Amino acid sequence: MWKYELGTVTDLADNTPTKGKWKTRVLKAVHSYWSDQIDSLTPLYSTLFFLRQDKYVPGKILPLLSFEYTARESERLKTKVRLLTGTYMLQTKRKNFNQYDINPTCQMCGEENENAEHFVLKCSALHSVRQSIMVDIERQWGGDNRDFI
């Protein structure tokens, strides 16, 4: 109780809250504590740098992680999280961290430098894979909005 600053046992014995009020109070305290912890740790870890506070809502699952858990999705999750946090080794990053002369051009299509934007949205070699996903996105967004691509 001290960790989440919920008061002492004596205070609770004197002022016993109802079940609903206690549940609300505990949820708020836990969410507040962990939000503060993440805010304080974000500058210390490079992988937390891309965690946007407007997308992180305590008690809600990140959209990236909100799927039915399957073995197939668990394998894909590693790549998704690495792309999201900026730790996936694309060609432009590999060029920066390698002592040899590495070509930053995409090895799949050979058209542009391989960065996250190119890999996810523009690579022509991945068009067929991306198209099935884009159909789902368009269906969820409800329309013919192709301006976001």
Image: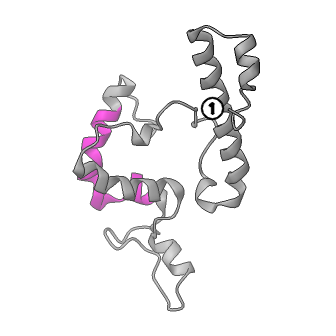
Q: In the image as oriented, which residue stretches furthest toward the bottom?
A: 100
- Residue 71 in the image: x percent, y percent? 23, 51
Residue displayed at 46% across by 59% down: 82
Above-or-below relation of 106 to 56: below
Disc 1 marks a residue whose amino acid type is Val
Q: Residue at x 28, y 36 (%)?
A: 135
Return the residue nearer the eye: 66 or 31. Answer: 31
- Secondary structure predominantly adopted by residues drawn in magenta: helix
Q: Position of residue 48 (x, y in %)?
A: 61, 54
Which image quadrant: the N terminus? top right
Q: Is residue 15 above or below residue 57?
A: above
x, y percentage for residue 50? 60, 51
Q: How many marks?
A: 1
Q: Is residue 77 left or right of residue 24?
A: left
Relative to 61, 139 lies left or right = left
* Residue at point 28%, 61% (across, down): 125
Q: Residue furthest top?
A: 18
Residue at numbered disc 1: 30
Give the magenta part as a residue range. 118-137
> For mark 1, does the 10 Å Cα neighbourhood hold few (<14), some (14 to 19), or many (20 or more) residues?
some
Look at the image and say whether residue 127 sits in the magenta stretch: yes
Task: Identify the residue shown where x is 64% and y is 54%.
Answer: 49
Identify the image quadrant of residue 112.
bottom left
Q: Is residue 34 visible?
A: yes
Q: Is residue 52 left or right of residue 121?
A: right
Looking at the picture, how far across and down is residue 101, in whole percent? 50, 89
- Tell me which corner region of the image, top left, top right, bottom left or bottom right, holds residue 30: top right
In the picture, which quadrant includes the C terminus? top left
Residue closer to the observer: 119 or 71: 71
Instruction: Please say if 84 is above or below 6.
Output: below
